[in-house]
Amino acid sequence: MREVNYLVVHCSATSFGKDLDVMDIDRMHRRRGWSGVGYNYVIKLDGTIENGRPLEKIPAHVKGFNRNSIGICYIGGLDESGKGADTRTPQQKEALLFQLMSLKQRFPDAVIVWGFTDEPASEIVIIAGIGSGLLFLKDKHVGLGERD
């Protein structure tokens, strides 16, 4: 298994209420010229966690950090007017917390990074820790949505 230093959370930057699945993301990424879905996991509106690119393969979601990261994408991220917003459903929030906690058990030293793919890199933050079901944030800047 490859070394994993980062667990990176993305949104799909898609319209509010429009549900997509891992195959939709796969098609979108192939249109960009990628070999397939760049994320390792996709979380649908109903909280279903779908497997994307296998963990043993290098994902394509954070330029310069793909080799040592895991990409998790929740569907949504744009409000009704098309602006970036936290549109996660309660089911997505629960599924995301579950997935992050599961991955942290497997990769305890990995840092959780929260990235909004529809905003500039200055909007990216590192989650310093998970406690009592809350995510605590701290500033960190990396480039998103590109392959190595």
Image: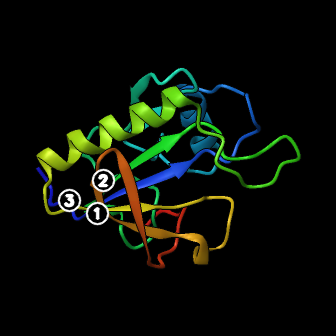
Disc 2 crowd, CA 10 A, few/some/many (<14, 14-19, 20+): many
**Which image quarter is the C terminus in?**
bottom left
Which residue sits at x=40%, y=27%? 49
Kindly identify which numbered label has been placed on residue 58.
2
Which residue sits at x=88%, y=46%? 81
Cα–Cα gap, marks 1 and 3: 8 Å
Q: What residue sits right under mark 1 in the picture?
A: 67
Q: Earlier along the polypeptide chain: callout 2 or callout 3? A: 3
Disc 1 crowd, CA 10 A, few/some/many (<14, 14-19, 20+): some
Which residue sits at x=45%, y=22%? 48
Q: Position of residue 18 (x, y in %)?
A: 72, 28
Q: Are marks 2 and 3 in contact (CB under 8 Å)?
A: no
Q: Are marks 1 and 2 in contact (CB under 8 Å)?
A: yes
Q: Nearer the viewer, residue 44 or 138?
A: 138
User: What type is the residue that disc 2 sits on?
Assistant: Ile
Q: Nearer the viewer, residue 121 or 39?
A: 121
Which residue sits at x=15%, y=60%? 3
Q: Is residue 116 placed above or below 82 in the rendered structure? A: below
